[in-house]
Amino acid sequence: MTMPERKALRIVFPGDVVGVAEEFIAGDGLEERDGFIYATRPGLLEVNMYTRTAYVLFHKPVKIPRKGDRVLARITNVERNLIYVKVFALESKKGVLPLDLSGYLIPPPGRRLRKEDIIRAKVVSPSTPLILELSEPDLGIIFTICPNCLSELRLSGSRLVCRNCGHTERRKIAKNNWFKRVRRS
């Protein structure tokens, strides 16, 4: 039985560690630093098993958020000093572009965020995983659910209110009608 010569592994982004120097030779789109092989451009990582060379195929440019860009993300886990997020969209002049990146959120002081909240955030560090913050008034929660009955919370004045069970709370809401824009009918 013969081993396949070329093997597609996964999509990579600049800064991703794709292997160690003893494993493969860094080809196009990769560089070796301190014994590790890093991606230098986004694309599909491929490995030639015969020559033990890894390289990144670059078909179409992938939009990667830059520092200061606004993104939409879902909170996946909340820990004491760190909030994990899954970034699913990037705001641009052409509209909202889909993304699929992981990141961290710098917790805003005194503001509660919960798992499954949908937020609008600013990119602080564009290397993967992204680092996000909610420091400006137009950043914050744009969709959330009631912790008691899991119904959608609606904005009423400066409070979030559950129309199903009556639960109310104050949270870091994105200003400029962002919370109202994503509300389901």
Image (cartoon, helix red, strand yellow):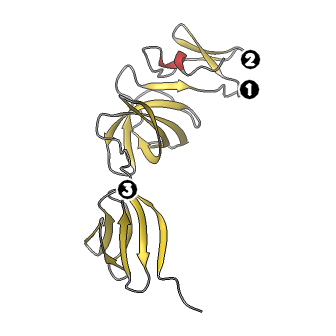
- Secondary element at image label 1: loop
Tell me the distance, in whole angstroms, between the alpha carbons under discs 3 and 1: 39 Å
- Going by the numbered disc 2, the residue's amino acid type is Cys
Residue drawn at point x = 71 percent, y = 26 percent: 148
**Amino acid type for the residue under numbered disc 1:** Cys
Secondary structure beneath label 2: loop
Whether tag 2 and tag 1 are in contact, CB under 8 A, the answer is yes
Three-letter code, disc 3: Phe
Give the mark, 3 or 2, whose residue is nearer the N terminus.
Answer: 3
User: Of 90 and 157, which appears nearest the observer?
Assistant: 90
Above or below for 8 versus 180: below
Look at mark 2 in the image and give the residue it sits on. 165
Quarter of the figure that contains the C terminus: top right
Percent coordinates x, y for residue 5 in the rendering = 47, 82
Question: Which of the two marks, 3 or 1, is nearer to us in this view?
Answer: 3
Q: According to the image, label 1 marks what residue?
A: 149
Cα separation, mark 2 vs mark 1, equals 7 Å
Q: Which mark is residue 13?
A: 3
Look at the numbered discs 3 and 2 and tell me whether their residues touch, using CB distance below 8 Å: no
Which residue sits at x=39%, y=68%? 18
